[in-house]
Image (cartoon, grey):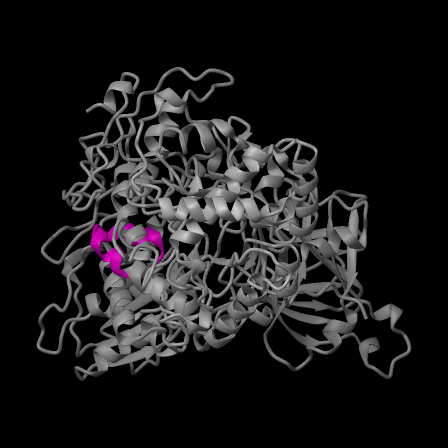
């Protein structure tokens, strides 16, 4: 091939990616194995990556990247339109086109006044600041922004605004939409054609609400599963990801060269994040990628070649850096490679204030980013100052007029291709307002098909599955009747936390699906979250559903891969002790070390994050009433499953590849394979692991954190179900909430303190989380209050209940929550969310970069607090800082 002639020796050129075929009918990756051995080493290397010796400060040489022409030719009509607009536009109007503001920080009037080219709704933004508002409100706000942007009464040219959103697994910000499995599950399907249907459904439902641009798909190749965005990737193999990209992209956008491209049922997509976000050191979000140029090209670049060839018109720059060079301003990649070699002719959009991380920049001032190849700033709350600074830089020449016009042209070209200049109000478009299409029968059927095909069977000893439909089935675990948990992050909100089943009017929980399948055949189903059942109601089999709580970046980053919520294991162990066969349905956004849980399970299903169609699990696990198999397992692991919890890099093709379950592994009902007992040495020392986001879970401190009782300067670590402080001022008693001893009652007999601290005196840096508006969440109920909190009492000072943090022996901040807790008595279980910024704002000298005690509770006698969980999570607007 002519393309290959320009490549340096050793570059692997995959035919479906670099031969520009679009990968219409990709076969399985050459690394996939149908072998059913539990630990299987692939015999072929899918990414035969050359590994030159890395230099201290490598450089990108664009000539080392394949040369690919743009697949979409420019048209004279659109080019003439762009030229005419540029001739009419002032510098002010041009700069406005390059700025995207968040709907929570901009009004329609400001969009008009500043000529803004785009708005977005971030993960926690929605019309009226209500993440659970209905579809109608989205359409109404889309009209308001459109009308403001197209008000030409002052003689400005007619240039409509675009609205972008993170519709990453369906139109997942909108209540009532179809929620598909996250990409990790879609990667397990090995059926890229189904992605076209998923993309089409997503595009249709978005257009019902008047939106026209999604920040999807993610085509990252994740090489370190500790990254909190692993579930947004289709897999660890670049060939697999590259084969998927064209299908999901064209499902959303349509096929280039056809009348439906970016029109009709189709709309604008975004491929992200360019480049190397899945390969940062230690899997750190927004971290540094230190792969060689060849690895960057061959591992992370492949999907972009196939996506651009399939018609990608927007690429989102990545937060990560490459050997310290932030991608948001890195011209060798954004301009020389992406545009000059990959043939990209759309526009490059930034990520949330990502330009502010470029050296010498801030969120409100970054000429370097635009000069480096970024075409549109995503400046959610920084947009106004950024607008003024960028305009000044254009006026004084720091940003050339040529570069300004180039960026504006790129944005206008895509708007023209989308038909936005056809003067059609969002609510007047063909699909707008057809709310019956949201989670329609057809759309839900696509989601259900995807969910059942995404399931991976890791273990099925004695061929326990599929289950007889007329069985007596116990369904247990906190994920069983929890649509929010099975849907994961980026669902209704950024982190996906706090969602209830009622927030999914068109969804079905895993339990509900099992109940429907079993009872229809004459069987019985009992739901028991803690796995307990009456003595006379022993089940034939138990299905235990548990796994990771929803998360996104920040919260999702991990230091290890141990699954450290012991509740599921406790249930499994108790059931096995009673001779009850057990089936685990494991919900997770990545492979995790779960050998103890696997050993206590007769069958184990890696369910990943299946979305709102929980009935898909029953489709595969439960036989039909006549005993036939309704659906077999199809899923194959898109990521290697670890044999220990260390988090050491584990990817198919590695020289010393020793997974627990190999990439491509997945049993079917035709396989009679016995998984022997697995070793239970995690390979990590719990005391040396800093778990920066989970502190108390099920009433117990999460290792390596300790719950300490403090009185008279003496510290007692809680190690027993009933623990008393040195002088008896405060006690901690393990107490049942939903299952045995899954909460702790803190009883302040006298004035005392309770603290969380690291067992090895390690400290946390929570500055980034504070900047991301994360909160410290306590899940609790108040059982009793100090006498002085009675409203008739005058001794308020003595009754102060303080919540704080420490950053060393003489570094402390405390917030007064006396008044807050005085209103909570008798209200049952509640969630308190304290924004991290509250702690630093209360004490300007407090160091969020060196937290030694992420929670300190100080109280006088009489306060009784039952505590189930303490963790970091997102702020959905309910955060409070205490006070009167």
| Direction from residue 165 to residue 610 in the image, left or right | left
Residue 170 among magenta residues: no
Taking the spot 48% from the left edge, 66% from the top edge, the residue there is 492
Taking the spot 51% from the left edge, 59% from the top edge, the residue there is 160
Residue 577, horizontal then vertical, whole percent: 31, 64
Residue 149 sits in which quadrant?
Answer: bottom right
Taking the spot 41% from the left edge, 44% from the top edge, the residue there is 79
Residue in front for this viewpoint, 721 or 883: 883
Residue 382, horizontal then vertical, whole percent: 66, 50
Q: Is residue 454 visible?
A: no
Indicate whether 627 appears above or below 375.
Answer: below
Residue 192 among magenta residues: yes
Residue in front for this viewpoint, 420 or 84: 84
Residue 838, horizontal then vertical, whole percent: 73, 57
Residue 392 sits in which quadrant?
Answer: top right
Q: Is residue 163 visible?
A: yes
Q: Which residues are magenta?
A: 181-197
Residue in front for this viewpoint, 113 or 63: 113
The overriding secondary structure of the stretch rendered in magenta is helix
Residue in front for this viewpoint, 800 or 510: 510
| Direction from residue 772 to residue 567 in the image, left or right | left
């Amino acid at each position: 091939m002519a393309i290959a002639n320009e490549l340096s020796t050793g570059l692997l050129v995959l035919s479906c990616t670099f031969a520009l075929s679009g990968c219409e009918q990709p076969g399985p990756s050459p690394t996939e194995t149908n072998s059913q051995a539990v630990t299987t080493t692939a015999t072929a290397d899918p990414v035969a990556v050359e590994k030159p010796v890395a230099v201290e400060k490598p450089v990108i040489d664009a000539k080392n990247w394949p040369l690919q022409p743009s697949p979409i030719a420019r048209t004279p009509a659109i080019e003439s339109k762009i030229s005419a607009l540029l001739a009419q536009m002032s510098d002010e109007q041009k700069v406005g086109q390059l700025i995207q503001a968040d709907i929570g920080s901009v009004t329609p009037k400001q969009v008009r006044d500043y000529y803004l080219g785009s708005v977005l709704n971030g993960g926690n933004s929605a019309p009226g600041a209500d993440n659970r508002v209905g579809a109608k409100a989205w359409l109404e706000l889309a009209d308001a922004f459109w009308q403001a942007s197209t008000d030409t009464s002052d003689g400005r040219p007619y240039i409509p605004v675009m609205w972008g959103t993170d519709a990453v697994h369906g139109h997942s910000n909108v209540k009532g939409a179809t929620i598909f499995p996250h990409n990790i599950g879609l990667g397990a399907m090995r059926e890229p054609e189904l992605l076209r249907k998923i993309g089409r459904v997503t595009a249709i439902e978005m257009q019902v609400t008047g939106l026209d641009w999604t920040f999807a798909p993610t085509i990252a190749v994740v090489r370190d599963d500790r990254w909190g965005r692993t579930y947004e990737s289709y897999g660890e193999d670049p060939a697999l990801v590259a084969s998927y990209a064209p299908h999901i992209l064209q499902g959303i956008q349509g096929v280039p060269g056809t009348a439906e491209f970016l029109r009709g049922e189709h709309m604008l997509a975004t491929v992200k994040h360019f480049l190397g976000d899945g390969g940062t050191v230690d899997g750190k979000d927004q971290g540094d990628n230190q792969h060689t140029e060849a690895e960057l090209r061959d591992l992370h670049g492949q999907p972009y070649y196939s996506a651009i060839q399939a018609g990608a018109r927007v690429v989102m720059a990545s937060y990560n850096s490459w050997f310290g060079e932030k991608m948001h301003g890195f011209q060798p990649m954004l301009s020389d490679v992406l545009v000059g070699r990959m043939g990209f002719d759309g526009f490059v959009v930034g990520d949330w204030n990502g330009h502010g991380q470029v050296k010498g920049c801030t969120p409100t001032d970054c000429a370097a980013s635009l000069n480096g190849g970024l075409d549109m700033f995503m400046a959610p709350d920084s947009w106004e100052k950024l607008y003024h600074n960028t305009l000044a830089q254009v006026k004084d020449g720091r940003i050339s007029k040529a570069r300004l016009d180039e960026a504006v042209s790129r944005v206008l070209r895509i708007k023209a291709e989308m038909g936005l200049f056809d003067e059609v109000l969002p609510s007047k478009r063909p699909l707008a307002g057809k709310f019956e299409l949201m989670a329609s029968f057809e759309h839900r059927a696509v989601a259900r098909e995807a969910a059942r095909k995404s399931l991976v069977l890791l273990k099925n000893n004695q061929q326990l599955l599929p289950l007889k439909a007329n069985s007596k089935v116990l369904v247990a675990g906190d994920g069983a009747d929890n649509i929010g948990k099975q849907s994961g992050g980026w669902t209704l909100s950024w982190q996906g936390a706090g969602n209830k089943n009622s927030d999914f009017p068109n969804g079905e929980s895993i339990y509900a699906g099992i109940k429907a399948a079993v009872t229809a055949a004459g069987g019985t189903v009992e739901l028991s979250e803690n796995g307990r059942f009456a003595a006379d109601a022993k089940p034939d089999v138990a299905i235990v559903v548990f796994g990771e709580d929803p998360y996104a970046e920040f919260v999702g980053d991990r230091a290890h891969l141990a699954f450290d919520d012991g509740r599921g294991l406790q249930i499994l162990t108790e059931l096995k002790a009673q001779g009850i066969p057990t089936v685990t349905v494991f919900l997770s956004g990545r492979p995790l070390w779960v050998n103890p849980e696997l050993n206590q399970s007769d069958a184990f299903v890696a369910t990943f994050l299946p979305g709102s169609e929980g009935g898909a699990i029953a489709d595969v696990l439960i036989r039909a009433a006549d005993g036939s198999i309704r659906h077999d397992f199809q899923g194959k692991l898109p990521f290697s499953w670890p044999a220990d919890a260390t988090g050491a890099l584990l990817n198919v093709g590695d020289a010393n590849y020793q997974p627990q379950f190999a990439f491509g592994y997945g049993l079917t009902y035709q396989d009679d394979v016995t998984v022997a007992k697995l070793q239970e040495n995690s390979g990590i020392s719990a005391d040396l692991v800093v778990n920066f986001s989970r502190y108390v879970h099920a009433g117990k401190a999460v290792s390596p954190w300790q719950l300490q009782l403090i009185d008279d300067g003496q510290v007692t670590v809680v190690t027993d179900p009933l623990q008393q402080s040195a002088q008896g001022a405060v006690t901690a008693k393990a107490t049942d909430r939903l299952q045995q001893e899954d909460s702790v009652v803190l009883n302040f007999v006298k004035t005392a303190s309770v603290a969380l601290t690291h067992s090895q005196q390690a400290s946390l840096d929570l500055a980034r989380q504070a900047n991301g508006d994360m909160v410290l969440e306590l899940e609790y109920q108040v059982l009793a209050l100090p006498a002085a909190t009675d409203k008739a009492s005058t001794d308020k000072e003595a009754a102060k209940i303080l919540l704080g943090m420490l950053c060393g022996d003489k570094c402390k901040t405390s917030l007064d929550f006396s008044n807050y807790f005085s209103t909570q008595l008798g209200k049952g279980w509640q969630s308190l969310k304290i924004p991290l910024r509250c702690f630093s704002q209360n004490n300007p000298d407090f160091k969020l970069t060196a937290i030694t005690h992420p929670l300190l509770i100080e109280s006088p006698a009489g306060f009784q607090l039952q505590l189930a969980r303490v963790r970091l999570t997102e702020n959905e607007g309910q955060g409070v800082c205490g006070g009167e």
